[in-house]
Image: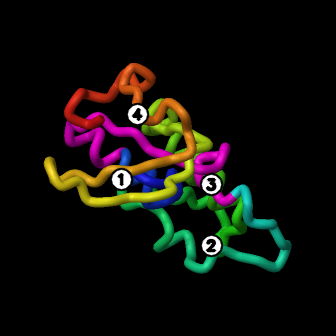
Amino acid sequence: IIGAGQSGLVTCKTFIEQGFNVIVLEKNSHNGLFHNIPEKEYFRWSSSRYISGYSDFPIPKSYPVWMTIKDFTKYLKSYKDTFKLENEILNLLEILETFKSCDDGYESSTCTYDYWCDPTQFPSWGPHQV
């Protein structure tokens, strides 16, 4: 999975629930949780807490209806922690290229990390996923 933001986290959780071994590649050190966006007092998340949360993990009522970036980041971190997704996330990996593999039909990727193609570095990976 490319990216550990809102979509990447729920995709990770869903695939794990279906019995897949999952690795999430995140280019930032903070799991895609909007740490690179400057917080401004007047800025609010673009949708309310009623529609921004996951159906199986609603945003708590203690959060403001119109959250700040820090509020939403805190919510995503709570989701990641609750469902124990941290071990599936590899930080500081930037995808440089993706392409269709001719022989097996799977997407292949190249990234900036040196041991990307060494399956021994990823104990939860099966040989079919390398």
Q: Nearer the viewer, mark 2 or mark 3?
A: 3
Residue, far right = 41
**Residue 15 visible to the viewer:** yes
Which residue is pictured at 59% across the width and 54% down the height? 32
Q: CA distance from mark 3 to mark 4?
A: 26 Å
Q: Which residue is mark 4?
A: 117
Residue 26 lies within the magenta run:
yes
Q: x and y percent of residue 109 in the render?
A: 39, 50
Disc 3 to disc 1, C-alpha distance: 15 Å
Figure check: 102 above or below 126 = below
The residue carrying mark 3 is 33
Q: Secondary structure at mark 1?
A: helix
- Residue 31: assigned label: none
Query: Which residue corresponds to mark 2?
Result: 65
How crowded pointer 3 is (Cα within 10 Å; few <14, some 14-19, many 20+) is rated as: many
Mark 1–mark 4 distance (CA, rounded to whole Å): 22 Å
Q: Amino acid at mark 4?
A: Cys
| Label ID, residue 11 | 1
The image shows residue 79 at horizontal and vertical percentages of 50, 47
User: Where 125 sits versus 17, above or below?
Assistant: above
Pointer 3 or 4: first along the chain: 3
Q: Are marks 3 and 1 in contact (CB under 8 Å)?
A: no
Quadrant in the rendering for residue 93: top right
Q: What residue is rendered at 45% in x and 51% in y?
A: 9
- Give neighbour class at mark 2: few <14, some 14-19, many 20+ (Cα, 10 Å): some
